[in-house]
Image (cartoon, rainbow, N blue to C red):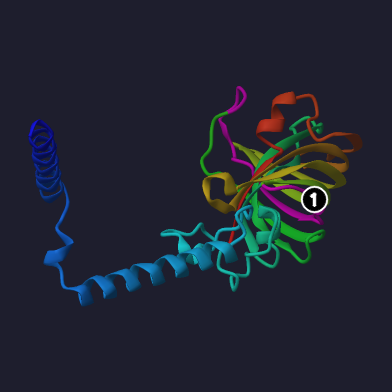
Amino acid sequence: MTTDRASESIRNKRRKIYRDATVMRATKYVDRRSVPWRTRLVASGTLGASLLVAASSLAAQDPFSDEVDASEVGLALPDTDPDSPDADVDSDHERVIGRLGVGLLGTQQAALAAPDGTISSLSVPTVGARYWLTPAFAVEAGMGLLVQTGSRDYGPETGTLGAPSALVLHAGLPISLAANTHFSFQLTPHANLGFAGQTLSADGVEETSLAGFQIGAGARIGAEIHFGFIDVPQLSLIAGVGVQGRLASVTVKGPGDNLGSTAFTLGTTLDNHPWQIFTGNVAALYYF
């Protein structure tokens, strides 16, 4: 009798534990019996097919590849179009091949006679163009014009000192020796031709004319720096130093004897003014 009661007590405890477990499962999980078996079958098949396709795609992709397709990215970098003419260039210098650059070509000198017949000079800013025929060779040409107006008194006598005027012609053959991303190291043989004149007048005295002629040639070595680092590779700044020879001839024609001087000078493009590396030897171009 005692044994039967003990067995019944154990069965009751098991039933209670089973009921409690059933209630916990019903509150924590969705009862799958409430979903039709056909729906469960379709959902299981769809999930399995999706996992299979994803696994096949990952297996086909090289996990160690660093290449990224631009079409898979929201924004592509500039010049990534394979049809772009600049897609394969390695430097800003190559981008301007076959383009015309226009701007300042530096400051050139023109010889002019002083009233006593000695040689003086005028600084004439020169503007012009440069065109790169190949990655290594280019041609450039420019002209500088200085025209001043007005007059001033000079000397103890009443008179005027007319303002000087000058014309300078410039030609060069730039050669690119090496080029990097935004930098081109260049050698530029060049030639210049200059003319200048001035008139002096005084009351009752014949006018005196001052004139000068100068021809020069030399070579300059330096660099052309393109502003591709700020996305403007068409803009460049050119600076350099070199040597040149200049032949100058001046004349003074007026009352009395005519005066004249001729001189040949060989020296650096800086002369005796080192700061000219920032003034007379700097050029700026924009390529179209």
Element assignment for label 1 = strand
Q: Position of residue 253 (x, y in %)?
A: 77, 43
In the picture, measured across the screen, residue 23 lies left or right of residue 260, that is: left
Binning the other alpha carbons within 10 Å of mark 1 as few (below 14), some (14 to 19) or many (20 upward) gives: many
Quarter of image, res 206: top right
Looking at this view, is 207 or 188 the one in front? 188
Instruction: Name the kind of residue labelled 1 in the image.
Output: Asn
Q: Position of residue 107 (x, y in %)?
A: 68, 42
Q: Check if residue 212 falls in the magenta segment.
A: no
Residue that carries the numbered disc 1 in the rendered image:
192
* Residue 3 visible, this orientation: yes
In the picture, measured across the screen, residue 26 lies left or right of residue 230, that is: left
In the picture, measured across the screen, residue 60 lies left or right of residue 186, that is: left
Looking at this view, is 139 or 8 the one in front? 8
Quarter of image, res 204: top right
Quarter of the image where the C terminus is located: bottom right
